[in-house]
Structures are given as structure tokens and as C-alpha cells.
Amino acid sequence: MFEKLVKWSRKKSPWIFHVSAGSCNNCDIERFGILLKGSPRHADILVVTGIVNRQAAPRVRRVYEQTPDPKLVVALGNCAVSGGIFKNGYNMVGPVDKVIPVDVYVMGCPPRPQAIIDGIVEAIKKYEVIKV
Amino acid sequence: MKRECTIIPMGPFHPALAEPEFFKLSVKGEKIIDVEIRIGYNHRGIEKLAEGLTYNQCIFLVERVCGICSNIHPLCFAQAVEEIAGVEVPDRAKYIRTVIAELERIHSHFLWLGLAGHIIGFDTLLMWAWKARELVLDIFETVTGNRQSYAMNAIGGVRRDLKKEHISKILKTMDEAERATKRFIKAISGDPVTLSRLKGVGVLSNEDAKKYCVVGPVARASGLKIDIRKDYPYAAYDEMDFDIPVRRDGDALAKTEVRLEELLQSIRIIRQAVDALPNGDIKCEVKEMPEGEGLSRGEAPRGEDLHYVVSNGSNMPERVKIRAPTFMNLPSIKPQLIGNTIADALIIIGAIDPCFCCTDRLTVVDVKENREKIMSSDELLQRSRKKSSADHRGS
């Protein structure tokens, strides 16, 4: 019963923190109806955009550690998923899954708002399988 | 003995800033007495990457310098390469470039207006402005197939033509955008709360504006009448009739007013450009790349954007240098912030419309400099801690 309640509440209101780790702002993230939070400590889902460069990588790792369990990570945009055109750049540590574990990948340069929402919904579905 | 000041770190992942940047505010009570800016969280090595790509691939790369000004960067790059190649772009392409550049300015200023409203707690303005912005993004999607990163520019012209149905859609949207802008002007000038949050906040004096070499709307709000579109016309701007809005106060309100008036001017330019759209080709062929160098400037929504390209005669550039507008505007937040309160810090930073993905094009040397800065700030912190512990013992 308790488990069901927790799962339900997690699914119904995911709180999101956006980590922009060297992105070009193209992935217009601000337009989903899910609550964006100001602190990773309050977040359920981390949305990471950008290539994760040398300077940002330790910070991204720290933000990931600050996020309470169970946490999900969505890598948003071609840069975050594969490095995109910046793949061979000297300042690149990423893609994101080299730095922190990623649950959902959203492709596109930039991804359409619908794709972003779809990615978040995919992430929410994962709460079904996460144990309380 | 009292501790000299409190240090408040802001960032790099700060909820109010969409991009990663780090500000270290030294405050005394509520008053900001010093600021330290640290950028580099967005550095992707674009200039170096460009050296390993062909000119046509570079267009794709420089488009990703910034998602919001994703037209002006390829436009400037293409102009610099065209200068080296010595080709004359067809008139129709010049006009289409102008239309797209002004549409970009409209969407960028609406975006900024919404963010500024959000920062000062005027969320209705955010919703309104972004609704209006969505109309412009719809045009982009119809004309170019993408909401942002339009891939319109090519070396020697543009990649897609403006069709008749596009033009009627653009004109219809411009009417709506004009109505929206006029409503925003009324909403801001008639709201005492908004006025009190913007007026006299973050003043950049005319002398400071000259000293810090600011560009774009920030310069124009401090009484400097500079605009690349008028001073060094590119694309079809020399045939357009438009005004440059200038304010003297240099505060956040002046910056807002300048941007709002620029919206109306942009709408005016687009109407003229689509009316007078000449017939003909949209692209000319570049047959050979000679050795040489090209410099091109353009007025991005945030100010002057500069691209410098060196060619060694091969199909790849030997060196690409990009100077984005925020690189010039960012240091100027120091005189703007000092003396203001922490509560105003965000709107002051927001008022210059910073774009860090544009700015973070530092060289390795700069990174080293940054490191030194960290050291010194660490020392500063330690010193202040030592001092406070000494105070503690003394008391």
C-alpha cells in the first residue's frame, strides 16, 4: 500500500532540475508543464544538456550526487547524447553518460518540445520498476 | 574588528540563470561591493574544431555557437568567407538574410523580455512574451523546418527561398507581433511595480559604457548610438529605412525600452524587406578559395558579432576567430552591480541579456588565467575565514 502510494506520487509530480553543461541553449527546455526546481536537492529528474566540458564535469558529478535517490537522468540533445559536432573537441569530457549514468536519451539538434516531453514521460515510466 | 564582507557564490548551476556561469558577489549587508565573474563552463573549443572542418561544415558548427543567435553566427562566417572568395551575393539572398536576421532579433528580444519579467516576478509578462515568441518560431519552422538553428545561410547566399505563402504568413505574424509589442510597452510603462524594479537599477553611465566597450542594446541604453546595421551595413540593411532607439539613463528600464523599440523597428524592416524582395537566384557558386583573410561584423540581438577567417587556399579555414557580443558586455556588469542590493543582482545581470554559450570561447591561456583567479579567490576566502576566526578569538 505504502509502496503504491510512493510510486503514484512520484509519477504524478516529477520535479526537474536542469543542468546546462556546455550547451548552446538550443534545447529549449523551459517549455514543459512539469515543475522545474531551483535546487538539485529537491529534484527527481535531472535533465542534462550540452557536451559536459572539463570545467563543468566535476560540477555535474556533484549535482548528481546532491540529488536524492531515486534519481533519473535525461540526456537532452545530440551534444548530451553523443557529443554531436563537438565529438572531437579538446575540451569535451562527455557525452553525459561518460560522467553520470543516464536513463533516457533524447536526440535532436535541437529536440522539439514534444520530444522533450516524451523523454520526460519515458523517464517517469521508469519509476514503475524502481523499488521504494 | 569586523569581517570585511560576506561572499555569496551564485552558480554555476543557478536556477535563475539558464546557463552555467559563476558569479562571486562580495556583499556588505545587502549592498554588493565587489563581483567576480567566472566563465568557461560552456567552453567547447569551437574555434579549434573549425580548423578541422570544411567551410560548408563550419557553417553547421558556428550555427551551434549559440542556439538563440543561431542565424547571425553563420551569417557573419559566410560573409567573411565570401570576402575572401571575392563573390557577390545575389540581391534576393541578401534580402532573405535580412528577414531571417530580424526575425531572430524579434524572437530573441521576446525571449529576453519574458526572462526579465520572470526575474522580477512578473510572470504574466513571461507567458505573454513567450506566446508572442512562439509565433515567430512557427515562421521559422514553416520556412526552414527547424524552430531554432535554421540552417538558412550558406557560403554565397541562402539555402532556402522565401515562398509566397511564407511571405503572407510573415506579414500576418508581424501584425500580431506589433500588437503584442505595443501591449508590452503599455504594460511596462503603466505598472508602478515593474517601473520601480527597473528604474535606476544597474546604471551604466555613458563614460563606463565607453570604457568597457559595450555593444548592442546595452550601449544604446547608455546613450551610445552604435549599430552595425547602420554604421557598417551588411546584407540589405543599406536599403532599409529604420531608426536606432537610444536612451541616456543606462538603467535596466532604459535597456528594456531600447529592446522594446527595437522590436518595432525590426517589424518595420521585415515589412520593407518582404515588400521589396527582388527576384533572382538565392545562391552563387564559390569556385575557388584563394589565400587571404576575411573579417565580417553583424548586429546580433545582443550587439556586435565579429568573425575573422584566415584561408590558406585549401577547403578548410586555417584560423577562425569569433567574438560574440556578450564577451564585450559581460565585464560591464561589475560597475552596474556595485552599490546595488543582492535582490537586484539578477535583473542587472539579466538586463545585459548575457549569452554565455556565445562568450565561452576562451583560449587555453585564459583557462590558465581562470585558474589563477580561483587561487586568488580561495586565498581571499581563507583570508576572510582567518580574519573571522581571529575576530572570534578576539571577542
Image (cartoon, grey):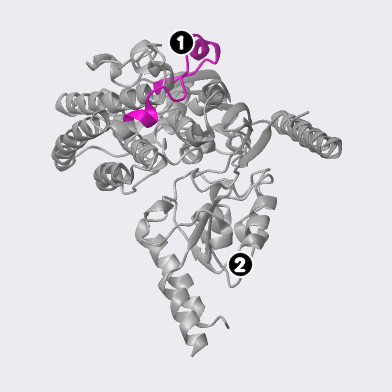
Q: Is residue B357 above or below residue B4?
A: below
Specify the label residue B171 is tagged with: none
Dot 1 alpha-carbon crowd within 10 angstroms: few under 14, some 14 to 19, many 20 or more: some
Q: Quadrant of residue A94?
A: bottom right
Specify the label residue A68 is tagged with: 2
- The residue at 37%/24% (across/down) is B199
Dot 2 alpha-carbon crowd within 10 angstroms: few under 14, some 14 to 19, many 20 or more: some
Residue B281 vs residue B225, the one in the foreground: B225
Asked whether disc 1 touches disc 2, contact meaning CB atoms under 8 Å apart, the reply is no
- The residue at 58%/39% (across/down) is B21
Q: CA distance from mark 1 to mark 2?
A: 49 Å
A48 in magenta: no
Residue B184: x and y in percent read 24, 34
Q: Viewed as shown, does residue B21 lie left or right of A33?
A: right
Residue B95 vs residue B359, the one in the foreground: B359
Residue A52 vs residue A3, the one in the foreground: A3
The amino acid beneath tag 1 is: Asn
Residue B283 appears in view: no
Q: Quadrant of residue B234?
A: top left
Residue B357: x and y in percent read 53, 38
Residue B146: x and y in percent read 34, 48
Farthest front residue in view:
B395
Image quadrant occupied by the N terminus of chain B = top right
Residue B248 appears in view: yes
The amino acid beneath tag 2 is: Pro
Please, which chain is the residue tagged with disc 2 on?
A
Magenta span covers which residues? B195-217
Q: Viewed as shown, does residue A95 lie left or right of B56?
A: right
Please, which chain is the residue tagged with disc 1 on?
B
Specify the label residue B206 is tagged with: 1
Residue B55: x and y in percent read 50, 34
